Amino acid sequence: MKVKDLIEELKKRDPEAMVVVDGYEFGVDELQRIIDAKVILDVNTKGYAGRHEIDPDGETIVVHLPRNH
């Protein structure tokens, strides 16, 4: 995804929404998609995990930029 495509996708979202990325890994890859998700904040305390957890029952709406699997 190019910057101009990312900007257009982000314009469709709430500008106050948090943006989250996947937890610790290595290497980089091109962004392929953006997902609207809900999270539970501050549930993970391990250094190798992201602080928040995606959960359909979460109360915080976020914009998730997932790794390509």
Image: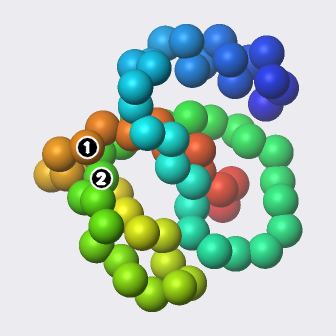
Element on which disc 2 rests: strand
Identify the residue at horizontal 68%, vertical 54% (top origin). Answer: 68
Q: Is residue 63 above or below residue 11?
A: below
Quadrant position of residue 6 = top right
Q: Which callout, 1 or 2, points at the residue further toward the start of the chain?
A: 2
The picture places residue 39, in percent across and down from the top left corner, at 30, 53
Q: Which residue does the image show at 42% across and 69% down from the upper left?
A: 51
Residue at the disc numbered 1: 60
Up the image or down, 63 lies above or below 56; here it is above
Q: Can you see residue 55? A: no
**Quadrant of residue 45 within the rendered picture:** bottom left
Secondary element at tag 1:
strand
Q: Residue at x 74, y 18 (%)?
A: 5
Amino acid bearing label 2 = Val
Determine whether, in the image, residue 5 is placed left or right of residue 37. right
Say above or below: 39 vs 7: below
Q: Nearer the viewer, residue 31 or 63?
A: 63
Q: Quadrant of the C terminus?
A: bottom right
What number of labels is visible? 2
Q: Quadrant of the N terminus?
A: top right
Badge 2 local density, few (<14 within 10 Å), some, or many (20+)? Answer: many
Based on the displayed image, in which of its 4 quarters is residue 37 positioned?
A: top left
Proximity of marks 1 and 2: CB atoms separated by less than 8 Å: yes
Q: Amino acid at mark 1?
A: Thr
Distance between the alpha carbons at the discs numbered 1 and 2: 5 Å
User: Mark 2 highlights which residue?
Assistant: 39
Viewed as shown, does residue 23 lie left or right of 31?
Answer: left
Q: Is residue 57 left or right of residue 32?
A: left
- Name which residue lies at 51% across and 41% down: 19
Q: Position of residue 42 (x, y in %)?
A: 31, 67
